[in-house]
Structures are given as structure tokens and as C-alpha cells.
Image (cartoon, grey):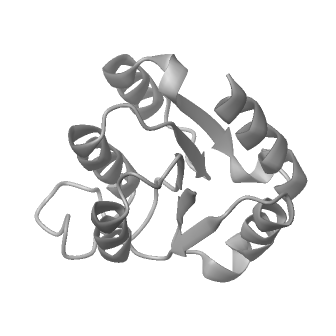
Amino acid sequence: MILFVDDEDIRMESYREELEFASYKVQYESSVDSAIVFFKENLEDIELIILDVMMPPGEAFANQKTHHGLRTGAYLYEYIRKVRSNIPVIFLTNVSDEALINKVEQASGEALIKFFEKKELLPFELVDKVKDFLES
């Protein structure tokens, strides 16, 4: 199962549908709070997480320095890594923050993480990236 976390429901619908068309089971969550609940309840079933960087911090990260939501995904990523360190994560985002990318890659190693910009990746291309990532 893929846990897909992004607050842009309508824009991400085509990505989710393309993944489902390719026979992936996808659980879409539009807030970090609902994503955390689902993640905790389905730890063993999740094979991959697709995650945005810019999202409202929700209650979970209200007291963190998310820079008004610009880094919320990074905090969610750190939470995920503490709970389950070996799960692959794809950041699908509009943010091209090299410092953030370097920090996350150094913390987890490049084998379990990929970064893609939404504007450069069509839905069918995401399916190809997911397939390659899960098979490697």
C-alpha cells in the first residue's frame, strides 16, 4: 500500500488515480494529522510514502518551526523515520530547497528517499518512478 500525503486534493487526484490504475492500493491523506493516524494504524501494510513538503502543520507540528508550513513535510518525514526507519519515501513537491534535500538525504541515505518536483513529473511518470523505486 502507498500512503500519499498532500494537501492539494484536486491537483493530486490524477496522480492517485494513475497509481490505482497501475494496480497500486493508495491511501490518500490531505493533512499531516490524518496521515499520522493512518500511518500508526497501518504500519506493516505501508510499502511506500509519497509526501509533499509544503502543507499546513496541523496539530502535530503546530509548535515546530515549519516556516508557515514550508517545511511541514520534513517534520512528518522525521516522525516517520523515528517510527519506521526502513520505509521508502518519495517527496513530490513544488519546493526545490537544496538544503532540505541534503539534510534529509544525509539523515536516511539515498537508497530510501527520492525527490521529484510536481511541475516536472506527470502522473504516468510518477507510476514509473514508484515502480522503479519499489523494485530496486
Q: Is residue 17 left or right of residue 92?
A: right
Above/below status of 32 relative to 105 = below
Q: Is residue 116 left or right of residue 98?
A: right
Above/below status of 49 relative to 114 = below
Which quadrant is home to the N terminus?
A: bottom right
Residue 27, percent from left and from top: 56, 70
Q: Nearer the viewer, residue 60 or 22?
A: 22
Q: Nearer the viewer, residue 43 or 98?
A: 43
Q: Residue furthest bottom?
A: 10
Q: Quadrant of residue 4?
A: bottom right
Which quadrant is home to the C terminus?
A: top right
Residue 91, percent from left and from top: 55, 45
Above/below status of 83 relative to 53 = above
Residue located 55% across and 47% down the image: 95
Q: Residue furthest left?
A: 63
Above/below status of 27 relative to 120 = below
Residue located 70% across and 82% down the image: 10
Residue 62, percent from left and from top: 17, 69
Residue located 35% across and 68% down the image: 32
Q: Is residue 94 left or right of residue 46?
A: right
Q: Quadrant of residue 28?
A: bottom right
Residue 26, percent from left and from top: 63, 66
Count of numbered badges drawn on the protein: 0
Q: Nearer the viewer, residue 105 or 43?
A: 43
